[in-house]
Image (cartoon, rainbow, N blue to C red):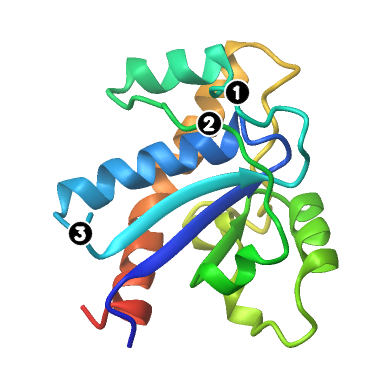
Amino acid sequence: MSKIAEISFVCLGNICRSPLAQGVFQDLVNQEKLDQKIIVTSAGTGGWHIGDLPDKRMRQTAQSKGIKLESRARQFQSADFNRFNLVLAMDHSNLARLEEIAPSNLPPEKLMLFRSFDPECNGDQDVPDPYYGGVKGFEEVYSMVKRTCPPLLNYIKSRFLNL
């Protein structure tokens, strides 16, 4: 068992969904005092926003819930699969792109859909991209992320930390 679990959330540009998941999950990790055992990052499949802060609307949504988003956008690279214990795609198109750049011998349990841990997914495992929508979309994404993070943390604790 690894003493440290490294997790990466991945969406398209790394300015909306994945930084929100990173922030919400990091807050949960901190609350459980696991910040020395779980390293949380995020990335995008595309490189359009490299170095940018998360979208202002997503930062405002998160801040209204007590979560501060300060990460900077980066692009996921195929070599990143060597670093992370678990890579979580925010939707099927991100998953498909990650599968294209993944090594052929990547264990299937290393790359998963984030909402596969959502107790209310009802078969829809995509986190919708709120970028082109209004405030309601950002709130909807926050709700999905908030309810998905606790079961994900339980999985990580049992799978990687033996807790």
* Residue at 31 percent of width and 61 percent of height: 38
* Residue at 70 percent of width and 21 percent of height: 131
Q: Secondary structure at mark 1?
A: loop
Quadrant containing the N terminus in the rendered view:
bottom left
CA neighbours of label 3 inside 10 A, class few (<14), some (14 to 19), many (20+): some
Q: In terms of sequence position, does the residue under pointer 1 or pointer 2 come before the other?
A: 1
Q: Secondary structure at mark 2?
A: loop
Which mark lies nearer to you, 3 or 1?
1
Distance from Cα at disc 1 to Cα at disc 2: 5 Å
Instruction: Specify the quadrant of the image occupied by residue 82.
Output: bottom right
Q: Which mark is residue 72?
A: 2
Instruction: Specify the quadrant of the image occupied by residue 132.
Output: top right
Where's residue 61, x and y in %?
A: 45, 18
- When the figure is inspected, residue 82 is found, relative to residue 151, above or below; the finding is below
Q: Relative to 151, is 81 on the left or the right?
A: right
Where's residue 71, x and y in %?
A: 46, 32
Q: Which residue is mark 1?
A: 52
Mark 1: which amino acid? Asp
Distance from Cα at disc 3 to Cα at disc 2: 22 Å
Quadrant containing the C terminus in the rendered view:
bottom left
* Residue at 31 percent of width and 71 percent of height: 4
* Residue at 31 percent of width and 67 percent of height: 154
Mark 2: which amino acid? Arg
Q: Are marks 1 and 2 in contact (CB under 8 Å)?
A: yes
Q: In terms of sequence position, does the residue under pointer 3 or pointer 2 come before the other?
A: 3
Q: In terms of sequence position, does the residue under pointer 3 or pointer 1 come before the other?
A: 3
Mark 3: which amino acid? Leu
Where's residue 146, x and y in %?
A: 40, 40
Q: Which residue is mark 3?
A: 34
